[in-house]
Amino acid sequence: MAQVLEFKLPDLGEGLTEAEIVRWLVEVGDVVAVDQPVVEVETAKALVDVPCPYGGVVTARFGEEGTELPVGAPLITVAVGAPASAAPTEDTGAKTEGSGNVLVGYGTSEAPARRRRVRPAQPPAGGAANGTGARKGPAADEASAAREVSAAREMPGAREVTATREVPEGPVPVISPLVRRLARENGLDLRELTGSGPEGLILRADVEYALRAATAQGRTASAPTAAPETTPLPAAPAVTGPAAGGIRTPLKGIRGAVADKLSRSRREIPDATCWVDADATELMRARAAMNAAGGPKISLLALLARICTAALARYPELNSTVDMAAREVVQLDQVHLGFAAQTERGLVVPVVRDAHARDAESLTAEFARLTEAARTGTLTPGELTGGTFTLNNYGVFGVDGSTPIINHPEAAMLGVGRIIPKPWVHEGELAVRQVVQLSLTFDHRVCDGGTAGGFLRYVADCVEQPAVLLRTL
């Protein structure tokens, strides 16, 4: 006998709490295999194909393309038959086919005991019954739920019912990583809270209320606490005047993530910027000589990245982050170099892992791979996070200078303008040289202007005289 299971939007990692449905990959009635992608979603980080941990027939889909769903919301229901090779379990006689933890936060591996409840549900289109995300639990729970469902079906006029279970284990939907950190630093177990946001989303107010209640009652911060009563906010005043007829674009997906991150950077980081003009003529000649020698072509961005890693080895203060909770500057051992890439979906910052250990050829190849993935929207969340320093080549937009905003929680960003012929005094004479403006925006908490100026001057010296790099090769 088939069992109808509900597959919910899993936690896609990196603190993401929602995703937008971009494209359904299956239709109602399709047969899906275990781990087959069923929907393409867009998070604040990237486009992700979500595989289903169940094999069977799709009986319902939840959400149209363009709909934004929170983590834990239903995606599809699947009618799953009992595999012939599966060993029967106690009291149930069947074992559900599953896949294990395919993505962070879901899967069909063994799970601790969970409570179950029975609720009525409308059958999906086509007459198939909706199922819920039932997973393997104790045999007694399974038998009890089966009896409840059977009894409900035999009642006169009863509608199709589905078994659900409350899941205190696994990822907890939290509105932001800041709220998750607040709970962690105060020893609060988020699984013990009931969120007051949409779909049980835990808000900052929920965590703060729980901490205040724990303090007032003299309990530990990890004790169960009820969610606070929430008062609806007053309706926003109607927009009048010229703005009423304007175009409104929701700040969601990548655009929303960029807005949040840049706002946080401006709010939390006391940044400062210094800049210098440099004669890049010799650097351009060196690159031309490398490419003329044969082998893979070396990109200008790779040479600039190699200069950055050499400069960070001399001035490691700029490869750090600030932990305000501990009031410490954390100097990092490895350089994971982010670089700004403009795409049709917005600005993204892919990260080259262990850039300090790569040569120019390896850096060129990795920049090319990540850039192509950025353009096609196939970057993974892991390729968009974990940077320690960012290189921003805004010269591709035809501009000379900028004061870039630091990519929080990093401590600095190097900006590179366009390289163009300009009058320049070279060896005591006026000449036309290839000139570039370099700018460094840095977190003034990690270092003073002397360190930042020394870093930028070293970068400029390497641009003007690439032979300076030979000391660090």
Image (tube, helix red, strand yellow):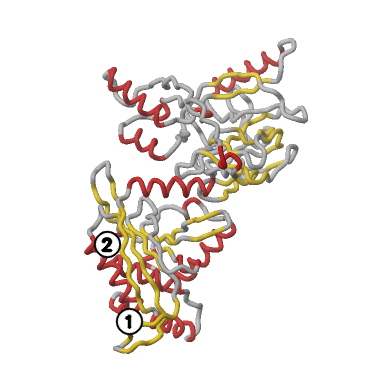
Residue 117: give x, y in percent of width and height.
56, 19
Looking at the image, tell me whether mark 1 or mark 2 is earlier in sequence order.
Answer: 2
Query: Which residue is found at the position 39% from the left and 82% from the top?
Result: 423
Quick one: which residue is furthest to the front in this view?
241
380 to 204, vertically: above or below = below
Q: Secondary structure at mark 1?
A: helix
On the picture, is 71 further left or further right than 54?
A: left
Q: Secondary structure at mark 2?
A: helix
Real-space CA distance between mark 1 and mark 2, rounded to the nearest whole angstrom: 22 Å
Query: Which residue is found at the position 29% from the left and 20% from the top?
Result: 219
Q: Nearer the viewer, residue 425 or 96?
A: 425
Q: Nearer the viewer, residue 433 or 100?
A: 433
Q: Quadrant of residue 216?
A: top left
Query: Which residue is found at the position 54% from the left and 51% from the top?
Result: 46
Mark carried by residue 467: 1
Kind of residue indicated by mark 2: Pro
Q: Which residue is mark 2?
A: 316
Quick one: which residue is furthest to the top in this view?
156
Q: Quadrant of residue 4?
A: top right
| Image quarter of the N terminus | top right
Residue 64: give x, y in percent of width and height.
67, 38
Mark carried by residue 302: none
Quick one: which residue is furthest to the right in this view?
126
Kind of residue indicated by mark 1: Ala
Query: Which residue is found at the position 30% from the left and 88% from the top?
Result: 427
Mark 1 burial class by Cα count in 10 Å: few <14, some 14-19, many 20+: few
| Image quarter of the C terminus | bottom left
Residue 467: give x, y in percent of width and height.
32, 81
451 to 77, vertically: above or below = below
Q: Nearer the viewer, residue 149 or 236?
A: 236
